[in-house]
Image (cartoon, helix red, strand yellow):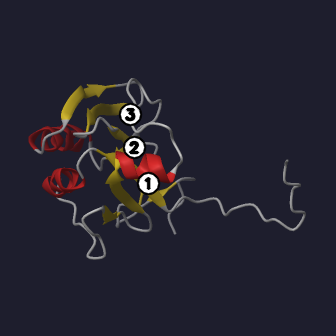
């Protein structure tokens, strides 16, 4: 049985609000992100941690709880996920600095800061294998609060 489309349904607004990561150990992952210098939100709890990213949030919960909530038959996964979270650095030198801090916090260096055709970029994985790119490019426009302006126009 299929549900007919609702003619009055509106499309969702063009934004995301949460990045949800399934992790092996919420407390250990919290320690990793705190070692990067991020502050955990006070409304977090032992099973669900939140980090305010300035208008959206990085949220951590156990892989088992995430899989159960998403009705997945298994909480395991491996290999290349085809997805990365990206931190835009303010300067080319910041790329290597962030990668170094991530490794010192317990992450794994995947690709060191490397000159590319568009700037400087490198990758690390957090302790659960989630891939992060640290990238610097002249083309991205960030305001004084380090918020991205996609079309390159600052308010």
Q: In front here: 152 or 20? A: 20
Q: In front here: 78 or 138? A: 78
Residue 48, image x and y in percent?
32, 63
Which residue is disc 1 drawn over? 19
* Front position among marks 1 and 3: 3
Task: Tell me the number on the disc at residue 85.
Answer: 2
**Quarter location, residue 44:** bottom left
Q: Earlier in the sequence, mark 1 or mark 2?
A: 1
Which residue is disc 3 drawn over? 76
Work out whether 101 lies above or below 78. Answer: below
Q: Earlier in the sequence, mark 2 or mark 3?
A: 3
User: Could you tell me which secondary element the residue under label 1 belongs to?
Assistant: strand
* Front position among marks 2 and 3: 3
Q: Residue at x 29, y 50 (%)?
A: 90
Q: In front here: 45 or 32? A: 45
Residue 57, image x and y in percent?
40, 63
User: Could you tell me which secondary element the residue under label 2 belongs to?
Assistant: strand
Question: Gap between marks 2 and 3, in whole Å?
Answer: 20 Å
């Amino acid at each position: 049985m299929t549900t007919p489309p609702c003619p009055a349904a509106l499309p969702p607004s063009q934004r995301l609000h949460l990045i949800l990561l399934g992790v092996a150990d919420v407390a250990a992952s919290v320690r990793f992100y705190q070692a990067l210098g991020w502050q955990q939100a006070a409304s977090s709890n032992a099973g669900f941690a939140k980090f305010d990213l300035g208008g959206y949030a990085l949220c951590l919960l156990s892989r088992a709880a995430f899989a159960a909530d998403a009705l997945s038959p298994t909480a395991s996964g491996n290999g290349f996920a085809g997805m990365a979270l990206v931190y835009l650095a303010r300067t080319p030198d910041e790329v290597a600095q962030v990668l170094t801090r991530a490794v010192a916090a317990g992450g794994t260096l995947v690709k060191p800061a490397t000159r590319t055709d568009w700037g400087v970029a490198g990758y690390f994985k957090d302790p659960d294998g989630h891939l992060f790119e640290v990238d610097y490019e002249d083309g991205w426009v960030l305001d004084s609060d380090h918020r991205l302006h996609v079309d390159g126009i600052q308010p």
